[in-house]
């Protein structure tokens, strides 16, 4: 067994590998960029080597630097994680040339599956069922379109290299083909430096079911059952579960054996995932094989009680598989939800920012959190915006789903926009509970998933107001203690006003509504209580703050909430985390007339930090409403800036390839007068 390994990755997967290595007594070496200098995976590892600037192409994707770091530290093997260099045959070859073990499949297997087109041809020869499609070498637009026209729309364009939904587009009509092909090729070129495409028939009600396979170099192969990954956005998985619901033992065996046949066809070794489309009639079709550990591997670990990273290390060290097929069994049910910094209500636009408050559910045999961040860390523009993976397990799907909903309600993040509410709505909506799931699930059930939770605020408004007043009191007491006259009424902590009652007038914003709240502070002996008036009702309130917990008594009803407070753009934002969800408030300050009015026409602003990959217009161009103007790439995703109305582009302020900050004016635009 190895005594030291290098992990050629970052974030949660690097932390995940370090945990298993530590358990096995193996030393670890981390690598990092400028953005990750103080990251969790660097702090967890025994050693760490600097690679370069923050962009991955200048750090994590530099194969020679990664191998040099392994040589320099005496690491005998490299674990690539997933993404970055994990499916790069040249990197694997470079490891071999330097007598470093690549913890993954051989070069030949990576090359065989590195091209989706070549993989389809191999699987066809191995008699693995395939989705109808074109996988040829002729990449002329006319050839690809003719193939799409022949098989009928909708079709799916897919980059032959890479994965994760990059370089992938659905095309619903022939008239959309050219634009979608150009976008897919551009995205593939950016992500993988390769823009070869294939075209497949797009099945309208399929499920995405994948099989976890493992092979050693002693001719042993097993499948560790299946995962259902049908719930996706932007062709990227959102919630995965294992085992797949509604699977008969016969179908499970058929798919498992087909997956092993796929792996053996390319002389596979190590952990791999064979992805299938499962149709409503239980026919299934090979999609692709991922020659690495998958993001969603924890759900397989939970139902098999096996450590797949340990399996990887043992196989790479030349050992036989730890279990035979007969020794493997499914126990219970598991879900994984990916916690992202993104805005589901704005087409899942990635978000950046500081994790000003971070509180995860308590981990146990039923709840697991795989993460690479801590409170205070930055979610940067340079990498995927996934914050963590929340994994739950229980004896049945129903019980595991209850665990998932509860854990999501206990996951608390402030400072960046996240998809937690979206995940909770998804996991608790009836179609998901009732297993009415296919790859179009999110689009079909938007009204159930994208909704604001109906919050009556009967307790939450007075709780938020009480928290604000208590916080002001604490701040006043601290300031008073620092002055030469701590007893001055101007440093009073109880809203002192000459000849007037001690009253706070507050305006709280919640979900685009504003609420006027009056808080009158009363004293009874040495303690205070508060009369809080909302909507004509006056409540007798008491409370205290202990760390980030607010304890309250409102008309005799005692409860508590976890509080997170942030200040942005001169506004105080408060999040109350309670058992029935999170309640977000903004303390709205009086308008003192110092706010500048934005020009109604004005300019279009960058929605996030990113790289301007395409400028589609120039000064003087007349454009139509929703016409694409610019394309920004951030966090491995593209975002198109569109014209808000018919109008004129007056000037542009950035060139292709330049970095832009979120909120920066990209161009000046004047709207046509009606």
Image (tube, rainbow, N blue to C red):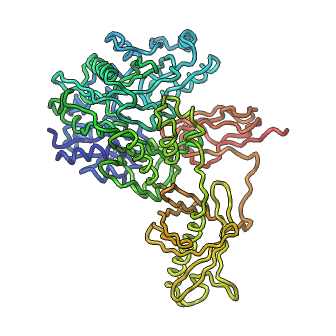
Residue at 47% from the left image edge and 59% from the top image edge? 356
Q: Is 468 left, or right, of 95 in this rendering?
A: right
Q: Quadrant of the C terminus?
A: top right
Q: In the figure, 64 relative to 265: above or below?
A: below
Q: Residue at the front extreme?
A: 556
Q: Quadrant of the N terminus?
A: top left
Q: Position of residue 58 (x, y in %)?
A: 40, 39
Using the rendered image of the protein, determine whether residue 653 is visible from the camera's viewpoint. Answer: yes
Q: Is residue 658 visible?
A: no
Q: Is residue 612 left or right of residue 39?
A: right
Where 150 sits versus 429, above or below?
above
Residue 621 point in image, percent of width and height:
74, 32
Q: Is residue 670 above or below residue 209?
A: below
The reply, left or right, for residue 132 in relation to residue 333 is right
Q: Quadrant of residue 310?
A: top left
Q: Nearer the viewer, residue 238 or 288?
A: 238
Q: Nearer the viewer, residue 336 or 663?
A: 336
Residue 494 appears at what percent x and percent y? 59, 82
Name the residue at 14% across, 31% down.
Answer: 319
Residue at (44, 27) in percent of width and height = 193
- Point 31% across, 12% down: residue: 126
């Amino acid at each position: 067994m190895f005594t030291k390994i290098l992990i050629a990755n970052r974030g949660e997967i690097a932390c995940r590998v370090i945990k298993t290595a530590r358990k096995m007594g193996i030393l670890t070496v981390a690598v990092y960029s400028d953005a990750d200098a103080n990251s969790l995976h660097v702090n967890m590892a025994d050693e760490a080597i600097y690679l370069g600037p923050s962009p991955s192409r200048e750090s994590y994707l530099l194969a020679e630097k990664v191998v040099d770091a392994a040589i320099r530290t005496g690491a005998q093997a490299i674990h690539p994680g997933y993404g970055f260099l994990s499916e790069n045959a040249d990197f694997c070859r470079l490891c071999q040339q330097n007598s470093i073990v690549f913890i993954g499949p051989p070069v030949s297997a990576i090359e065989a599956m590195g091209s989706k087109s070549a993989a389809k041809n191999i699987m066809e020869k191995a008699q693995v069922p395939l989705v109808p499609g074109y996988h040829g070498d002729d990449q002329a637009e006319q050839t690809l379109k003719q193939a799409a026209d022949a098989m009928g729309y909708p079709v799916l364009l897919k980059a032959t290299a890479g994965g994760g939904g990059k370089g992938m587009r659905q095309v619903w009509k022939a008239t959309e083909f050219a634009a979608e092909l150009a976008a897919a090729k551009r995205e593939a070129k950016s992500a993988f430096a390769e823009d070869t495409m294939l075209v497949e028939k797009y099945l309208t009600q399929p499920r995405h079911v994948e099989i976890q396979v493992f092979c050693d170099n002693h001719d042993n192969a097993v499948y560790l059952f299946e995962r259902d990954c049908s719930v996706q956005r932007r062709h990227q998985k959102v919630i995965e579960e294992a085992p797949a619901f509604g699977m008969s033992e016969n179908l499970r065996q058929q798919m498992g054996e087909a997956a092993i046949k796929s792996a053996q066809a390319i002389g596979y070794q190590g952990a791999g995932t064979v992805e299938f489309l499962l149709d409503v009639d239980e026919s299934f079709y090979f999609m692709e094989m991922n020659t690495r550990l998958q993001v969603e591997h924890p759900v397989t670990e939970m139902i098999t009680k096996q450590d797949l990273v340990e399996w990887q290390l043992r196989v790479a060290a030349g050992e036989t598989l730890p279990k035979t097929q007969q020794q493997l069994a499914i126990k219970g049910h598991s879900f994984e939800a990916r916690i992202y910094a993104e805005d589901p209500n704005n087409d899942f636009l990635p978000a950046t920012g500081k994790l000003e408050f971070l509180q995860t559910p308590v981990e146990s045999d039923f709840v697991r959190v795989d993460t690479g961040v801590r409170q205070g860390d930055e979610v940067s523009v340079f990498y995927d915006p996934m914050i963590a993976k929340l994994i739950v397990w229980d004896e049945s799907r129903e019980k595991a789903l209850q665990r998932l909903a509860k854990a999501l309600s206990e996951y608390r993040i402030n400072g960046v926009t996240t998809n937690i509410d979206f995940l909770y709505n998804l996991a608790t909506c009836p179609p998901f509970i009732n297993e009415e799931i296919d790859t179009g699930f999110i689009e079909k059930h938007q009204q159930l998933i994208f909704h604001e939770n109906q919050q009556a605020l009967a307790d939450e408004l007075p709780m938020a107001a009480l928290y604000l007043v208590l916080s002001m009191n604490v701040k006043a007491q601290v300031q008073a203690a620092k002055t030469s006259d701590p007893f001055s009424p101007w440093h009073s902590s109880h809203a002192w006003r000459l000849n007037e009652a001690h009253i706070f007038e507050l305006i709280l914003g919640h979900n685009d509504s504003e609420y006027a709240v009056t808080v009158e502070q009363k004293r009874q002996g040495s303690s205070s209580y508060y009369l809080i008036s909302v909507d004509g009702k006056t409540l007798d309130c008491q409370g205290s703050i202990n760390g980030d917990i607010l304890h309250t008594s409102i008309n005799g009803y005692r409860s508590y909430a976890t509080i997170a407070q942030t200040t942005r753009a001169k506004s105080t934002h408060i999040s109350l985390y309670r058992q029935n969800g999170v309640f977000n408030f903004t303390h709205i300050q009086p308008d003192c007339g110092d706010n500048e009015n934005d020009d109604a026409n004005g300019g279009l602003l960058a929605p996030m930090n990113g790289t301007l990959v395409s400028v589609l217009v120039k000064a003087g161009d007349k454009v139509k409403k929703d016409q694409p103007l610019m394309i920004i790439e951030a966090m491995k995703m593209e975002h198109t800036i569109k014209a808000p109305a018919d109008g004129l582009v007056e000037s542009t302020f950035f060139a292709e390839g330049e970095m832009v900050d979120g909120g920066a004016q990209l161009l000046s635009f004047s709207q046509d007068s009606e």
